[in-house]
Amino acid sequence: MRRNKYFSLMVIVVTALSLTLAGCGSSTAGGDKGPIVVKFAHVTTPDSPKGMAANKFKELAEQKTNGKVKVEVYPSSQLYGDKEELEAVQSGNVQIIAPSVTKLVGMNPQFQYVDLPFLFPNNEAVYKFWESDVNKKLMNSLDKYNVMGLAMWPNGFKQFTNKVRPLVEPKDFNGIKFRTQAGKVLEAQFSALGAGSATIAFGETYAALQQGTVEGQENTFNNIDTQKYQEVQPYLTVSNHGRIDYMIIVNKSFWDGLPADIRKALDEAMAEATKYEIQQAEILDQKSMENLKNSGKMQFTVLNEAQLAAFQQAMQPVYTQFESVIGKDLIEAAKAASKK
Ligand code: LMR
């Protein structure tokens, strides 16, 4: 009886020990214990710029490390949604994620700069801002959450869609409820226009639009197209009023714990995947705009200069409201990057 008890205890201890070792081997050890597994989770489709570049990173990372690293890409919120992926990367349940920077607001509210209405006039200004010291500081501002920024990837400028009416002037927003990604700046933007808002995870937005939980949303041409919002949003306004851009973030202890040669190879893979992503984002932005126009499902309103000026004026209070939260130096750096 007693011997049996000891035997069972031994079995439990040995099993637990081997499970722990097997767990370590799958994500950190590499070498004899099999490849280092990097889980890369994101929320858009595989054919979005982010999806394509995540797959490109996988291909390059595996090639450059001669198979010592295996990258598993999980698109379309398959593994985690917006909120869960942020928790998962901190705890190391996933090693890399690529959230739109506004979703990092809970860790550092300065990331809401990206939502300031009409801050950037074109892609080049955004890319230039990313080279600034201010942005580099932002990318390294998340140490206490055990994550760090590896790269910036663009998606593009946001446009408004809704199912109520064409949005031509600020007053057209009155009473319509819009889905937002996260944060207070977007809430303030809509309230400056007399509209309501609710934060909804990307993976749940189509259903929320279909069911009428919200009547409108703002997103890039490519996200609208790949999420098929045209099926439930008959009106689109081309406004280019804000951005969706990503910060690729990695679990810091995982990254710091990698052998130096592996980290170098992954850095190179990330740099090449980033170049590819930038190209794809620009190509797919245009392509999706055409797809949406040709779908016959959406009425397009392209704002002219006077109409854009009316929106800029209506949204101006958002700057005064959030200047202290986002930081004057950051806003100045973004404006400096916008100058030719
Ligand atoms: C959104 O939530 O609308 C976007 O941030 C999704 C994405 O990752 O592009």
Image (spheres, helix red, strand yellow):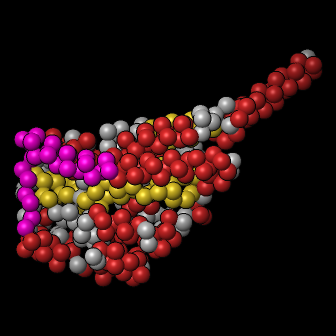
Q: Residue at x 30, y 82 (%)?
A: 320
Position of residue 64 relative to residue 247, above or below, is above
Position of residue 134 relative to residue 176, above or below, is below
Left or right, residue 153 beside residue 225: right
Along the line of sight, which residue is nearer the eye, 218 or 9? 218
Q: Residue at x 21, y 74 (%)?
A: 315
The magenta-colored residue range is: 279-304
Residue 172 at least partly seen: no
Q: Residue at x 18, y 58 (%)?
A: 160
Image coordinates of residue 227 in percent, x first then y, are 26, 42
Picture quadrant of residue 178: bottom left
Picture quadrant of residue 168: bottom left
Picture quadrant of residue 42: top left
Q: Quadrant of the C terminus?
A: bottom left
Image coordinates of residue 324 in percent, x first then y, are 40, 81
Residue 332 at least partly seen: yes
Q: Is residue 158 magenta?
A: no
Determine the residue located farthest toward the right in the rendered image.
2
Q: Provide the major secondary structure of the magenta segment.
A: helix
Q: Quadrant of the N terminus?
A: top right
Q: How many marks?
A: 0
Image coordinates of residue 129 in percent, x first then y, are 38, 70
Left or right, residue 122 beside residue 70: left
Position of residue 208 relative to residue 319, above or below, is above
Image coordinates of residue 59 in percent, x first then y, are 48, 37
Position of residue 312 relative to residue 238, above or below, is below
Q: Residue at x 45, y 49 (%)?
A: 272
Q: Is residue 297 magenta?
A: yes
Left or right, residue 89 beside residue 25: left
